[in-house]
Image (spheres, rainbow, N blue to C red):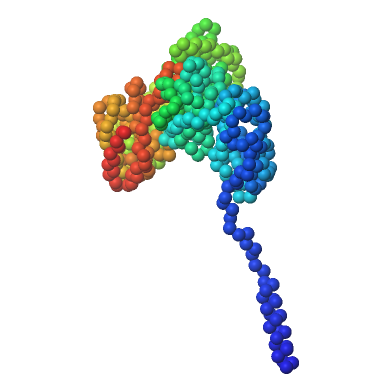
């Protein structure tokens, strides 16, 4: 009996130890349910609204975030309402209206994705609180979609606005608030304008920087259709956004060295004439592109003559301006330097290029030679582009070949009569089988001329144009995934042109092939592209 008792006590102790073993406490299934509204005062979709405060109560703690970006009030209010709480958890939202409400008008508050539960952040998506100051709620609507005139993907947070067609003028979008407004927010390409009155309207889309519902030509994109919209309507509206080309304007030049100025500008500088003078006497200058990509500035090189100031005159269409810049003696003076802009491997479609940091006046090809790996001379030609400050060497390339470019002293003379020292550059070619070929057949071309561009991650890498051809053969291109873009070049200037709102001009039409084209080494790819 004693042994039996001892064994029983031992078993009980082991059972207690096992029961006390540590385990992870489970919180149960993850909450994926969005908050629900218990009530609102006044009730949602009320008529004859007279108060200035709205209170909405939820079944759990909620948070309100990004309210300035997410909340859309239509018609827009001049004074934004006070909404609490923001950032802290609460079971209610209070909206205090500061603006004077219009009579017989239906208002809607679309909260977008701003309301979430406190624990898991589940959004109460696109919640709308609607009320009318009159006897009835306006219930008409229109729908549409947003495109970008240039990019394949449109911007997010695009505002779509309606104006009364009877009072609308071209200047309205610059000065006045719309009657109705909605926004695509951060995830929508489509839009819906709801709770509208019957009537005739003008429609405008804006991608804004200031979010003041006014068109700023310097910073905003705009989309419009010239015709009037009549509501009710079953039509699906498409609005294509573009950013206008800014009117040309030059900034006062700044001295950067003892022989160079920088001049910033807005707009397009291509058709500008820039001259310089000192003491009522014109002096020679050279103008070139600023070396930093996407920087709207030019370099102005002036001669090494003694001057205490310089006058720079700029004209572009109706724009005319003369700047006077004081000159100082600085520690920096630009002198001739040459930089290889070509990779070690030279592609068959490319030319060998050298960048210069001062403008070039003369190239003596008799002092330049190109030889292959067997020391056999190769015929070549040179071309210098002033604005790019770039020397191009064109020659016939062969597979698996090495090319040695020798530049003897004095072959290149710059704006300051400085010549180069002895230079040597080496580049190689690969096999043709290391590249791919792509043929594009365009079907249903509506007009000419057209431009065909191949892009890699939104950057144009190959380009062709045509006044009549519909098949384009891109030979020996790098293996990669390509996007195909077609431009109807209506003004035949070999580039895409944006639109202009006041001129009622839409941007030149662009059509993207709907998927990327995979071109691999030693592949021949043929792709039909229906321009629908």
Q: Which residue is found at the position 58% from the left and 55% from the top?
A: 30
**Quarter occupied by the N terminus:** bottom right
Looking at this view, name the residue that lies furthest to the right: 2
Camera-side residue of 364 and 489: 489
Q: Is residue 334 left or right of 93 when viewed as pictured? A: left
Left or right: 341, with 81 as reference point: left
Q: Nearer the viewer, residue 298 or 226?
A: 226
Task: Inspect this view and state whether residue 455 appears.
Answer: yes
In the rendered view of the protein, which quadrant contains the C terminus? top left
Q: Residue at x 56, y 51 (%)?
A: 32
Task: Residue 340: tell me if it is visible.
Answer: no
Report the number of discs: 0
**Residue at x-position 50% and y-position 20%:** 164
Q: Position of residue 463 (x, y in %)?
A: 34, 32
Relative to 11, does residue 264 appear above or below in the rendering?
Answer: above
262 w.r.t. 424: above or below:
above
* Residue 472 placement (x, y as % from top left): 28, 34
Say which residue appears at 67% left-offset and 27% top-offset. 98
Which residue of the protein is positioned furthest toward the bottom in this rendering? 1
| Among the 4 quarters of the image, the one containing residue 37 | top right
Given residues 121 and 139, the one toward you in this image is 139
Percent of width and height locating residue 518: 35, 45
């Amino acid at each position: 009996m004693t042994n039996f008792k001892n064994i029983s006590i031992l078993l009980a102790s082991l059972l207690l130890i096992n029961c006390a073993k540590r385990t992870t406490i489970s919180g149960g299934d993850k909450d994926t349910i969005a908050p629900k509204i218990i009530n609102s005062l006044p009730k949602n979709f009320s008529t004859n609204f007279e108060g200035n405060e709205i209170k909405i109560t939820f079944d759990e703690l909620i948070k309100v975030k990004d309210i300035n970006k997410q909340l859309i009030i239509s018609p827009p209010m001049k004074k934004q309402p006070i909404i609490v709480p923001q950032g802290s958890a609460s079971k209610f939202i209070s909206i205090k209206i500061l603006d004077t409400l219009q009579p017989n008008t239906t208002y809607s508050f679309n909260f977008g994705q701003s309301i979430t539960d406190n624990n898991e952040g589940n959004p109460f998506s696109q919640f709308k609180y609607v009320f009318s100051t009159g006897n009835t709620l306006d219930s008409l609507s229109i729908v549409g979609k947003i495109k970008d005139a240039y990019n394949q993907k449109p911007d997010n947070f695009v505002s779509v606005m309606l104006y009364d067609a009877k009072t609308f003028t071209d200047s309205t979008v610059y000065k006045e608030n719309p009657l109705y407004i909605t926004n695509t927010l951060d995830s929508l390409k489509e839009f819906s304008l709801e709770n509208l009155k019957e009537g005739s309207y003008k429609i405008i889309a804006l991608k804004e920087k200031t979010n003041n519902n006014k068109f700023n030509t310097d910073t905003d994109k705009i989309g419009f259709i010239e015709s009037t919209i009549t509501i009710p309507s079953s039509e699906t509206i498409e609005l294509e956004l573009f950013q206008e080309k800014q009117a040309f304007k030059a900034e006062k030049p700044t001295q950067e060295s003892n022989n160079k100025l920088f001049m910033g500008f807005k707009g397009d500088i291509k058709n500008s004439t820039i001259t310089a003078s000192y003491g009522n006497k014109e002096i020679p200058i050279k103008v070139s592109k600023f070396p930093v990509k996407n920087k709207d500035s030019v370099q102005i090189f002036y001669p090494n003559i003694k001057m205490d100031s310089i006058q720079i005159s700029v004209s572009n269409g109706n724009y005319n301006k003369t700047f006077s810049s004081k000159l100082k003696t600085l520690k920096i003076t630009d002198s001739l330097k040459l930089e290889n802009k070509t990779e070690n491997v030279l592609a068959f479609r490319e030319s060998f290029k050298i960048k210069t940091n001062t403008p070039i006046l003369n190239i003596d090809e008799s002092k330049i030679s190109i030889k292959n790996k067997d020391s056999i001379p190769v015929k070549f030609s040179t071309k210098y582009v002033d604005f790019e400050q770039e020397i191009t060497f064109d020659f016939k390339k062969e597979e698996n070949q090495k090319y040695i470019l020798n530049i003897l002293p004095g072959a290149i003379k710059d704006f300051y009569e400085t010549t180069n020292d002895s230079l040597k550059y080496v580049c190689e070619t690969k096999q043709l089988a290391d590249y791919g070929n792509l043929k594009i057949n365009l079907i249903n071309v509506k007009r000419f001329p057209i431009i065909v561009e191949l892009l890699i991650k939104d950057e144009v890498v190959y380009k062709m144009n045509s006044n009549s051809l519909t098949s384009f053969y891109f030979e020996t291109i790098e293996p990669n995934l390509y996007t195909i873009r077609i431009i109807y070049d209506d003004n035949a200037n070999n580039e895409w042109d944006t639109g202009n709102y006041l001129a009622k001009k839409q941007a030149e039409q662009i059509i993207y092939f709907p998927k990327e084209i995979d071109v691999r080494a030693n592949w021949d790819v043929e792709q039909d592209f229906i321009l629908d």
